[in-house]
Amino acid sequence: MIFPIVLDEVERHYGPVKAVDGVSFCAQAGEVVALVGHNGAGKTTLIKLMLGLARPSAGRVAMLGQDPADGDVSVRKHLGYLPETVSFHPALTGRETLRFYVRLKGGRRGGEDALLERLGLAHAAGRRVGTYSKGMRQRLGLAQAMIGEPRVMLLDEPTTGLDPELRQQFYALLREMQAGGTTILLSSHALNELEGNATRVVILDGGRKIADGSLDELRRMARLPTRIRLRTADGGAPRLRAWMGEPPGLRQINGHIVEIDASPEDKAAFLRRAAGADAPFEDLDMMPPGLDELYAHFLAQRAPR
Ligand code: ATP
């Protein structure tokens, strides 16, 4: 099987700066991989290497089984790219802009209107891009990246500037592409919105990969506690605390809510006890660590440089 994305011990140096430092990973068809990391972690450089816009100083990049920088354009036709900052000619209409990119990609004319429709821009197809809002320009950028139904989509901070509704629409589009077998790699700083949308998260720091896995896998690796919040009738918090045995770290939030952070083992033991008839609470919420907590954990654990 050919992986759509293969990075093998990839390095990219800019003078003394190691923008990418020994990164390896593969992505399968239909995966949505999120690259996360601080500013300067190497996300954009990795995307450039995958597009063939930069060559690795060491290691190997293969996209759909080919070197994207070897001059053969055939592989690049199957790669869609949305840069971090999209800028289009303000005097061209949305339709003209897409037509221009179709020609640039050597694609067949037509289909622009269908793409604009898919991105919710049909009503603005004949309007000059200079009159578009930031969200509309971002969607036009995504339409441009989707020309020719690429097998791999590389999206650099694609939701910056989109309002919550447009973000949801954006992720719905990604799910459609994913269901069709497209491999999607996006870089993002918006950790919360990646939960439930990315099948896998790769954390970068100073050009190095410091963690890689699904949210569940990262949780298992990190072994961070799950927050358990218990609610009872008004004034019942002392009874709850007594039933729990006043363990260290127990927090009383108010007269009827207490919270505790439970390790994976403690969580299972707690749940068994909570199923008993004498458990004095009315409601229970379990909050596993979010991606922002996991991210902070892996950064704190990284090897000193
Ligand atoms: P951001 O979130 O700010 O976009 P990033 O994770 O995409 O950051 P990169 O843009 O890949 O990070 O940069 C990684 C490192 O490489 C940074 O230290 C950056 O200054 C350096 N770098 C990137 N491109 C070049 C270049 N063309 N010349 C010199 N240094 C560069």
Image (spheres, rainbow, N blue to C red):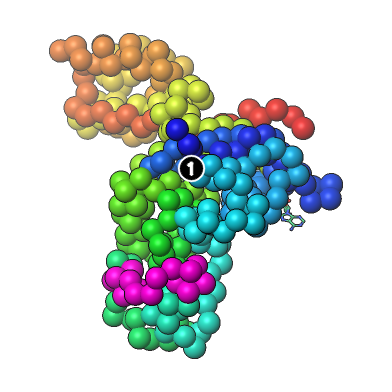
Please identify the residue farthest to the left as the structure is shown.
Answer: 277
Q: Residue 166: where, in percent of width, then height?
A: 35, 63
Q: Residue 229: where, in percent of width, then height?
A: 32, 29
- Residue at screen point 28% across, 16% down: 271
- Quadrant position of residue 231: top left
Q: In which quarter of the image is ligand 1?
A: bottom right
Label 1, on which residue?
Answer: 4
**Magenta part of the chain:** 101-117
144 part of magenta stretch: no
Asked whether, in this view, residue 239 is left or right of residue 91, the answer is: left
Q: Residue 182: where, in percent of width, then height?
A: 39, 48
Q: Is mark 1 within 8 Å of ligand 1?
A: no
- Residue at screen point 41% across, 29% down: 216
- Residue at screen point 33% across, 71% down: 111
Can the viewer see residue 284 in this picture?
Answer: yes
Q: What element carries label 1?
A: loop
Asked whether, in this view, residue 89 is left or right of residue 243, the answer is: right
Q: Label 1 amino acid?
A: Pro
